[in-house]
Amino acid sequence: MFEFLTGTVTAIYPDYLVLAVGPIGFRLLLGNPYQYHEGATATIYVEQIIRETEQVLYGFRDQAEKALFDQLTSVSGIGPKSALAILATDDHQGLLTAIRTEDVRFLTKFPGVGKKTAQQIILDLKDKVGQGQAATLFTPETVGPASDNPILADGLAALAALGYSQRELDKIEPKLAVLDLSSADAYVRAGLKQLSH
């Protein structure tokens, strides 16, 4: 129904943001809402999923990311939340390479993806993912002179919204706390790198 929305980001939460388009505020679920900034004008590609009890708009940076989301959700055992968690990583090329090379270990690092689901992703998508499908999910952040706990807390909340357990977050929090990052997006990206090791 919708291809994309262009508007002003009015609020950012760990698992979604609100995009004001005219007098309407759209609630868009994203893998990492902190890649956007409050008050900024943004064009976000969307996928609407309607179920018996809910209607949800999922947001993406570009058409390539949206297409990969559609492919991931076509796999048995991968729902929209798991697909968003997989797309939140900034190693998009690594994801596509893992599918092509049947790297089960790489795929099982994502929350909600066990060995069986990873094998199903490979089986269903190996012949569908092309070399040119990698999209840049995150733009490099300028690191500021200092960070404070609310920014780190926002980053950890976004990781929790992706499905990472409190135990996993407790393990990486000390490593993130010593970093001098300027945005929740930067903490999310750093956290995803720590969680993938």
Image (spheres, rainbow, N blue to C red):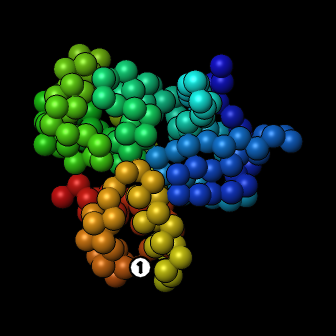
Residue 25 on image: x %, y %: 76, 44
Using the rendered view, name the quadrant where residue 80 is placed: top left
- Quarter of the N terminus within the rendering: top right
Q: Residue at x 58, y 49 (%)?
A: 16
Relative to 36, 191 lies left or right: left
Residue 20 vs 97, above or below: the answer is: below
Relative to 108, 151 lies left or right: right
Using the rendered view, name the quadrant where residue 118 is placed: top left
Residue 134 on image: x %, y %: 35, 34
Relative to 158, 19 lies left or right: right
Q: How many marks?
A: 1
Which residue extends farthest top? Answer: 127
Label 1 sits on residue? 180
> Observer-nearest residue: 64 or 132?
64
The kind of residue on which mark 1 rests is Asp
Q: Residue at x 81, y 40 (%)?
A: 24
Q: Residue at x 39, y 26 (%)?
A: 73
Residue 101 on image: x %, y %: 13, 30
Residue 27 vs 34, above or below: the answer is: above
Residue 107 vs 77, above or below: the answer is: below
Q: Is residue 172 visible?
A: no
Q: Residue at x 56, y 38 (%)?
A: 59
Residue 127 on image: x %, y %: 23, 16
- Quarter of the C terminus within the rendering: bottom left
> Observer-nearest residue: 146 or 68?
68
Which residue extends farthest right? Answer: 23
Q: Is residue 53 visible?
A: yes
Which residue extends farthest front? Answer: 53
Residue 26 vs 33, above or below: the answer is: above
Element class at badge 1: loop
Q: Residues within 10 Å of mark 1 (few under 14, many from 20)?
A: some
